[in-house]
Image (cartoon, rainbow, N blue to C red):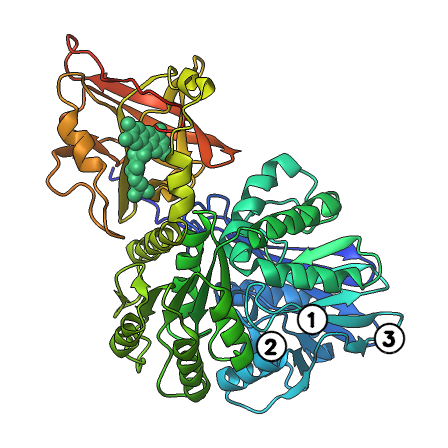
C-alpha cells in the first residue's frame, strides 16, 4: 500500500456570537497564518473580526479577508439578509478587513459606505462602480435608532492613515479595528486569559503601533471624551472586556515611553502603493528596536506644514520613493520637495524604492541630501520584485543601523567604563563564548554571545541575554528554533572575529564559514566544540536585553578532550 501524504490544509473557520445587546460578531479564524506582514514571530494565527449592529437600521462594521469569502458571506447570510444592511462602516481600508467590500456591495447595492475621506477615496478606486457613501470625521454621529447612536473617532495611522473608531454609547462598545488588537487565534472571544495573550499583544503593539505612538496618544485622548467603554471590539484577536483597563493602560504607557525616547526618525511612505507601507513598517520596527522613536507619515495625504515640522524635529529621515503617476503623484512629489527643503546638515537619511511601477528615482534625492551634508544611515534599498521575508529582514536591519547611528552617543556612554568598584565587581561575573545561529525560511542570522547559562534540568533549558537591537532577535521569538554553538578554547578567535564584523543589512553572515544544517534547520558551525539544538520557550523583557529561555532538544560534542572557551572581562558594562 502506498501512503499518500495529505496536502497541508490551512484551517479557516468562522464563529459568531452576540457580544452586547443587538450586536453580533463574525470572527474569521485563521488558525495557521504564520506570518503577517513583517511580524516574523506570529505563532498563534490571527482573526479578522466583523460586527453587525442592529437598531431600527443596521450597520456592518468591517468585513473580512478575501480568503474567507465563501465562509464569511455564508455566515453573514445566516445572520441577516444582506439587503437589510443599511450601512457598511469601514474602520480602515487595509485588505484584511475590507477584502470583501466589493462582494457586499454586489449583494446589497443600496448600502451606504461610511468611512473617513481617504477611505472613501480609496474605495472609489477599488470598486470602480458608483455606490452610496457618507464621509465622516471626528465627532460625527450616525443614529441607527433604538438608542444606538454611533459616534466616530478619528484615529489616523492606527495603523492605516484612514482609520476611524466607532463608539456605540448604548452598549458602551468601541470598535477599533487594528488598535488594541493582536494576532492571536483562539475559540475564546474575549481577553480573559491575560497571561496567554500578553506576549502577542505587546509584540503587535511594537510592530504596528510603536511607530505611531503620537497618533496612539492622540486617539486615546479623543477616546476619553466618549462615554464609558466596557467592550473594545478589535479587528484582530480577542475582544477586550475582562482586562480592558489594564490593556489600554499599557498602550498609553508604552506610547508615552516611545514619544519620550528622545531622538526621532521620520519615516515617509506612500500608503496603498507598491509595498511602500509594509517596507516602511519593517524599517520602523528596526528603528524602534534601538529605543529611538519613529514617526511615520503618508506622503499621499501629508500636509506641507506637518511635513516641515516633522523634518525639523527628526534626527534622521527615511523616504520611500513615491509614484510619479496616478492620483497621489503630485501631492507626494511636492511632499518630497518639502522634505528636501527642510532637511538639515546634521541629519541622517535612508531611502527605499518599492518598484511599484513608476517610482520617483531615489538617486537624485540621495545626491541632493548628500550635497546638503546629510549622512547616509543605510545603503539605498531598491526592490524590483514582490518583497520576500529576506527583504523585510533587510529593511528591519537597515532601520536598526539607522537607529544605532542617530543614537551613537548613548551607545558610547553605555560602554564607557564607570571605573567604580561595583563595575569591576560585576566584571567578575564571567561566561563562555558561543555563536547562536538561526534559520527561518529564507532568512538566517548569527551572533556571538557570552551571556549564556544553563537554566533548568527538567526539561533541559538554557537562558541567553540578547540585546533588543540584535539582528538575530527577530528569529528568536517564542517557538523559534536555533543552535547554540559552543566555541573551543584552542580555536575560537577566527570565529569570534568573523561574527563580530559589522555586517551590512541583509548580508549573509555565513559566507566563508564551514557549516552543516542541524535537524532544526539552523547552521552548526564546523569548528564548534559542541552544539545544542534549542527551541525558544519564553522571553522576559529586561530593559535593554531580552532574556530568552529555550529548551534543549539534542546536542553533540565534537572532541571530548577539548575545553570550552571561557570569557573573562574586566568591567560589567562591556560583554
Ligand atoms: C565577548 C562578547 C560577548 C558578547 N555577548 C553578547 C551577548 O551575550 N548578548 C548580546 O546580545 N550581544 C553580545 N555581544 C555583542 C554581539 O555579539 C555583537 O555585537 C553583535 O553580533 C552585533 O550586532 P548585530 O548582530 O545586531 O549586527 C557580545 C560581544 C562580545 C565581543
Q: Quadrant of the N terminus?
A: top left
Q: Is residue 269 left or right of residue 5?
A: right
Name the residue: 27% across, 25% down.
Answer: 434
Quarter of the image where one finds residue 438: top left
Q: Nearer the viewer, residue 339 or 178?
A: 339
The span from disc 1 to disc 3 (Cα, nearest Å) is 15 Å
1 and 2 marks in contact (CB < 8 Å): yes
Give above or below for 445 relative to 281. Answer: above
Q: The residue tagged with tag 2: helix, strand or loop?
A: helix
**Residue topped by disc 2:** 104
**Residue topped by disc 3:** 145
Q: Is residue 317 left or right of residue 88?
A: left
Q: The residue tagged with tag 3: helix, strand or loop?
A: loop
Give above or below for 423 relative to 164. Answer: above
Most distant residue in the top direction: 561
Label 2: few (<14), some or many (≥20) within 10 Å? some
**Residue topped by disc 1:** 60
Residue 262 horizontal/vertical position (percent):
52, 52
Please identify, in this view, whether the residue under mark 1 or under mark 2 is nearer the observer: 1
Q: The residue tagged with tag 1: helix, strand or loop?
A: strand
Q: Is residue 23 left or right of residue 349?
A: right
The span from disc 2 to disc 3 (Cα, nearest Å) is 23 Å
2 and 3 marks in contact (CB < 8 Å): no
Q: Is residue 187 left or right of residue 171?
A: left
Amino acid at each position: 500500500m502506498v501512503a499518500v501524504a495529505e496536502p497541508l490544509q490551512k484551517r479557516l473557520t468562522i464563529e459568531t456570537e452576540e457580544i452586547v445587546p443587538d450586536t453580533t460578531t463574525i470572527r474569521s479564524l485563521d488558525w495557521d497564518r504564520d506570518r503577517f506582514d513583517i511580524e516574523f514571530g506570529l505563532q498563534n494565527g490571527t482573526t479578522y473580526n466583523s460586527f453587525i449592529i442592529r437598531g431600527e437600521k443596521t450597520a456592518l462594521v468591517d468585513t473580512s479577508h478575501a480568503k474567507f469569502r465563501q465562509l464569511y458571506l455564508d455566515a453573514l447570510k445566516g445572520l441577516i439578509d444582506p439587503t437589510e444592511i443599511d450601512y457598511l462602516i469601514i474602520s480602515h481600508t487595509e485588505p484584511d478587513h475590507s477584502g470583501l467590500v466589493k462582494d457586499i456591495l454586489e449583494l446589497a447595492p443600496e448600502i451606504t459606505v461610511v468611512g473617513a475621506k481617504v477611505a472613501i477615496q480609496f474605495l472609489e478606486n477599488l470598486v470602480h462602480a458608483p455606490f452610496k457613501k457618507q464621509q465622516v470625521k471626528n465627532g460625527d454621529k450616525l443614529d441607527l435608532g433604538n438608542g444606538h447612536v454611533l459616534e466616530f473617532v478619528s484615529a489616523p495611522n492606527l495603523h492605516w492613515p484612514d482609520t476611524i473608531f466607532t463608539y456605540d454609547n448604548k452598549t458602551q462598545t468601541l470598535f477599533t479595528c487594528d488598535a488594541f488588537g493582536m494576532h492571536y487565534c483562539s475559540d475564546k472571544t474575549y481577553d480573559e486569559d491575560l497571561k496567554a495573550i500578553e506576549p502577542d499583544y505587546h509584540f503587535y503593539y511594537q510592530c504596528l503601533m510603536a511607530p505611531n505612538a503620537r497618533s496612539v496618544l492622540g486617539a486615546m485622548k479623543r477616546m476619553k471624551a466618549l462615554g464609558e467603554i466596557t467592550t473594545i471590539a478589535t479587528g484582530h484577536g480577542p475582544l477586550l472586556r475582562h482586562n480592558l483597563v489594564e490593556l489600554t493602560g499599557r498602550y498609553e504607557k508604552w506610547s508615552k515611553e516611545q514619544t519620550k525616547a528622545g531622538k526621532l526618525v521620520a519615516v515617509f511612505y506612500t500608503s496603498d502603493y507598491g509595498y511602500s507601507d509594509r517596507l516602511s513598517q519593517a524599517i520602523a520596527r528596526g528603528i524602534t528596536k534601538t529605543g529611538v522613536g519613529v514617526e511615520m507619515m503618508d506622503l499621499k495625504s501629508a500636509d506641507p506644514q506637518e511635513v516641515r515640522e516633522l523634518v525639523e524635529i527628526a534626527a534622521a529621515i527615511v523616504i520611500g520613493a513615491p509614484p510619479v503617476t496616478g492620483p497621489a503623484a503630485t501631492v507626494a512629489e511636492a511632499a518630497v520637495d518639502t522634505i528636501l527643503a527642510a532637511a538639515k546638515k546634521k541629519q541622517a537619511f535612508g531611502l527605499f524604492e518599492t518598484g511599484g511601477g513608476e517610482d520617483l528615482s531615489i538617486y537624485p534625492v540621495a545626491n541632493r541630501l548628500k550635497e546638503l551634508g546629510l549622512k547616509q544611515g543605510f545603503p539605498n534599498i531598491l526592490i524590483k520584485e514582490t518583497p520576500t521575508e529576506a527583504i523585510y529582514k533587510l529593511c528591519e536591519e537597515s532601520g536598526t543601523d539607522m537607529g544605532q547611528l542617530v543614537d551613537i552617543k548613548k551607545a558610547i556612554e553605555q560602554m564607557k567604563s564607570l571605573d567604580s568598584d561595583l563595575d569591576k565587581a560585576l566584571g567578575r561575573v564571567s561566561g563562555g563564548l558561543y555563536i547562536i545561529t538561526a534559520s527561518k525560511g529564507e532568512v538566517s542570522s548569527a551572533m556571538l554571545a557570552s551571556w549564556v547559562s544553563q537554566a533548568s534540568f527538567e526539561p533541559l533549558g538554557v537562558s541567553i541575554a540578547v540585546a533588543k537591537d540584535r539582528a538575530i532577535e527577530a528569529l528568536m521569538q517564542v517557538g523559534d528554533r536555533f543552535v547554540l554553538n559552543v566555541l573551543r578554547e584552542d580555536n575560537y578567535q577566527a570565529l569570534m572575529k568573523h561574527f563580530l564584523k559589522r555586517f551590512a543589512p541583509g548580508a549573509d553572515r555565513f559566507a566563508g564559514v564551514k557549516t552543516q544544517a542541524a535537524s532544526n534547520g539552523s547552521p552548526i558551525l564546523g569548528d564548534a566544540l559542541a552544539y545544542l539544538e534549542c527551541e525558544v520557550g519564553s522571553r522576559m523583557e529586561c530593559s535593554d536585553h531580552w532574556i530568552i529561555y529555550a529548551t534543549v532538544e539534542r546536542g553533540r560534542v565534537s572532541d571530548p578532550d577539548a575545553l570550552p572557551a571561557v570569557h573573562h572581562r574586566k568591567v560589567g558594562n562591556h560583554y
